[in-house]
């Protein structure tokens, strides 16, 4: 007959079944039961609420519930006292007191701001974890540049430059060469390729006024200020516009030289002549043309 070994411990169970759950054993022993949870996992339309709020020792039940409601709202939803009083039965006085509780304990931040039209509005920020100030993003219009590298993208556009009446690849290349050579006159006039592309038409406008590239270069570099040039391209754009010389006096274009026809031999009179007609000279041509028709 086999003998049971009472010193061997029973095998551990992989999970606690319903009969071995502590709350089930407590009810089986007659202990007074507390809350039990019949939970299902949410996959849509849910909000995560911290126990520091749901079990806050100092907030009223109305404030806790109001904070949960506010945290469940989408960004931009109105949460003024009148709006909340129309939604819940507590009334504006109790709701205002609950909002002050949440503000005192850091779950709300309310500031008064002036809009561009001059209207005063209240901006409210809901904090799901008080003490972690700055987690709520600021509006894009109020956000400061995060690094100096972002500043060039926000700089103002360069001033306009004079527009020439005619441009060609050769003229633009000559103008670009003038701009590229300015740094030899003053190192502060070092330009980027984008700046030179913007300024080149203005230089062409000077060149078409019968100025040589050397004269344009001298006009742009004479009398430079002694202080640092923060934006040399903007300085040159202003100078190209402010010092633009007038157009030269209008000149009547020269008449094109007369056309010289080849030497020909007339088929009628056998004389040599120059003319557009290949077979008859000017004297014989009318004789060879048919008379006009009589109507």
Image (cartoon, rainbow, N blue to C red):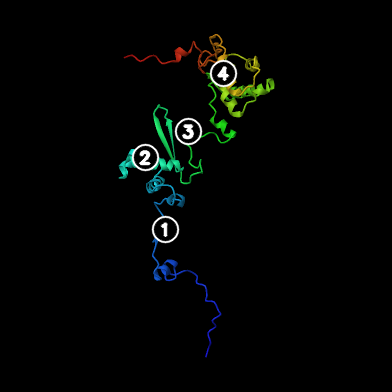
- Judging from the image, what secondary structure is the residue with disc 4 in? helix
| Tag in front: 1 or 3 | 1
Is residue 37 placed above or below 10 in the rendered structure?
above
Considering depth in this image, is 48 or 229 the residue closer to the camera? 48
Q: Residue at x 37, y 14 (%)?
A: 292
Q: Earlier in the sequence, mark 2 or mark 3?
A: 2
What residue is shown with label 4? Answer: 238
| Tag in front: 1 or 4 | 1
Q: Which mark is residue 252?
A: none
Q: Earlier in the sequence, mark 1 or mark 2?
A: 1
Is residue 256 placed above or below 89 in the rendered structure?
above
Q: Is residue 181 visible?
A: no
Q: Earlier in the sequence, mark 4 or mark 3?
A: 3
Mark pair 2, 3: CA separation:
30 Å
Residue 174: image quadrant is top right
Q: Position of residue 216 (x, y in %)?
A: 62, 16
Considering depth in this image, is 146 or 63 the residue closer to the camera? 63
Q: Which mark is residue 141?
A: 3
What residue is shown with label 2? Answer: 96
Q: Position of residue 3 (x, y in %)?
A: 53, 87
Mark pair 1, 4: CA separation:
67 Å
- Judging from the image, what secondary structure is the residue with disc 3 in? helix
- Judging from the image, what secondary structure is the residue with disc 2 in? helix
Q: Residue at x 40, y 67 (%)?
A: 31
Q: Earlier in the sequence, mark 1 or mark 4?
A: 1
Q: Marks 4 and 3: CB-CB under 8 Å?
A: no
What residue is shown with label 1? Answer: 41
């Amino acid at each position: 007959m086999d003998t049971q070994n009472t010193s061997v411990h029973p095998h551990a169970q992989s999970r606690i079944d319903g009969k071995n759950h502590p709350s089930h054993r407590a009810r089986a022993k007659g202990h007074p039961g507390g809350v039990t949870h019949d939970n299902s996992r949410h996959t849509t339309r849910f909000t995560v609420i911290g126990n520091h709020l749901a079990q806050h020792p100092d907030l009223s039940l109305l404030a806790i519930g109001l904070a949960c409601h506010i945290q469940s709202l989408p960004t931009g939803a109105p949460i003024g006292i009148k709006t909340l009083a129309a939604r819940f039965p507590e009334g504006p006085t109790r709701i205002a007191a609950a909002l002050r509780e949440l503000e005192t304990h850091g779950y709300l931040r309310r500031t008064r701001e002036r809009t561009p039209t001059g209207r005063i509005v209240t901006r409210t920020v809901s904090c799901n974890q008080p003490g972690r100030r700055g987690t709520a993003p600021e509006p894009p219009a109020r956000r400061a540049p995060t690094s100096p590298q972002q500043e060039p993208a926000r700089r103002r556009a360069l001033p306009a430059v004079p527009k020439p009446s005619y441009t060609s690849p050769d003229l633009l290349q000559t103008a670009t060469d003038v701009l590229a050579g300015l740094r030899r006159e003053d190192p502060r006039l070092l330009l980027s390729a984008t700046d030179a592309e913007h300024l080149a038409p203005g230089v062409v406008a000077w060149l078409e006024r019968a100025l040589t590239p050397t004269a344009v270069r001298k006009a742009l570099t004479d009398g430079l200020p002694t202080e640092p040039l923060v934006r040399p391209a903007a300085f040159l754009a202003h100078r190209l516009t402010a010092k633009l010389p007038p157009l030269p006096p209008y000149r009547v274009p020269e008449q094109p030289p007369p056309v010289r026809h080849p030497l020909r031999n007339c088929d009628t009179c056998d004389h040599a002549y120059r003319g557009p007609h290949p077979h008859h000279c000017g004297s014989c041509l009318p004789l060879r043309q048919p008379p006009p028709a009589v109507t």
